[in-house]
Image (tube, grey):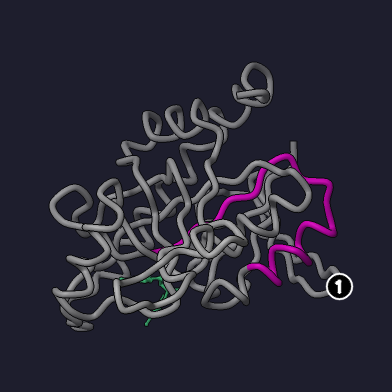
Amino acid sequence: MRVLVVTAVPVERDAVTRAFTDGPEVVRAPGAELHRAGGFDVLAGGAGPASAAAAAAFGLASGPYGLVVSAGIGGGFAPGAPVGSLVVASAIVAADLGAETPDGFVPVTALGFGRERFEPPPALVREVAVATGAVTGDILTVSTVTGSADRAAALRAAHPDAVAEAMEGFGVAEAADRLRVPVLEIRAVSNAVGPRDRDAWRIGDALAALTDAFGKLTPVLEGWTHHDRLD
Ligand SMILES: O=C(O)c1cccc(C(=O)CC[C@H]2O[C@@H](n3cnc4c(=O)[nH]cnc43)[C@H](O)[C@@H]2O)c1
C-alpha cells in the first residue's frame, strides 16, 4: 500500500522523511513534488485548507494510494495535549466553516449543504495512538490560528472532544474523500491553543516528535493493510 503524506511546509515534510534512512528520492509529478522515503510519499502543500486540498488532490492523482495522512505541527488544547505531545484525529473537523448569525456560529450542515467532519478508520487511529503514544480526539481545522482565550474557550465549548487545531486536515480529508481513500491526521503539538505567544512555540521539539512518530508507523500500517482495511 502506498501512503501519501501532506504537510504544510517543507520543514514538516523533512521531519517526516528524516524518520527513514533511505531517501528521500524526489519525484516530480504534475502539481506535486513528492519526497519518497520509508514507503511514504511526502509533499509540502502549503498552509491552510485550500492549499492542502489542492496539493492533496494533485498528490493523489499520482497514485493509487491506500491512505492519505495530513501531518505537521499544531496547537494543543490544554491539559490533554501539552506542547511536545502527539495527537491523532478520531475526527477531522472544519471548525470555522459556516455562518455567523445573531445566535452565534452555525456550521455548514445546519445551513443545508456541505460537511464539516471526516472520521478516519477507528481501528487504525487506535493502533497508531498505541504505537506512538498519541492522544486521540477531534483535530479542528481553522483558517485563522487561535490567538485569544475567548476564541479558545468558544472552540472548546463547540467541540468538547477537541484535542488540537491546525490548518490543513479538513482540506486533505476533502480531497481523499473524493477518491474514497482513507485519511489520518497526525499532529505534534508546538504550542498551546490560546493567547498568541509566538516565542513560546516549540517548533523544534514538535518536529522531533513528528519524526519519532513516523518512525513507529510502518509496522502499524503493514498490519492494517493485511487485517483491518474495512474498518
Ligand atoms: O517558523 C517556523 O520555523 C515554522 C516552522 C514550521 C511551521 C511553521 C508555521 O507557522 C506553520 C503553521 C502551521 O502550523 C500549524 N499550526 C501550528 N500551531 C497551530 C495553531 O495553534 N493553530 C493552527 N495551526 C497551527 C498549521 O497547520 C499551519 O500550517 C513555522
Residue 14 showing in the rendered view: no
| Residue 80 is inside the magenta segment | no
- Quarter of the picture containing the N terminus is top right
In the displayed orientation, state which residue is furthest to the front.
102
Could you tell me which residue is drawn at 49 percent across and 51 percent down?
Answer: 185
The quadrant where residue 38 appears: top right
**How far from the left and from the top, in percent, is residue 105?**
35, 70
Residue 17 showing in the rendered view: yes
What is the magenta range? Answer: 53-73
The type of residue carrying mark 1 is: Pro
- Report whether 164 appears left or right of 55: left
| Residue 70 is inside the magenta segment | yes
Could you tell me which residue is drawn at 35 percent across and 48 percent down?
Answer: 87
Q: Residues within 10 Å of mark 1 (few under 14, many from 20)?
A: few
**How far from the left and from the top, in percent, is residue 95?**
41, 64
Ligand 1, seen in the image, is in the quarter at bottom left
Could you tell me which residue is drawn at 66 percent across and 52 percent down?
Answer: 37
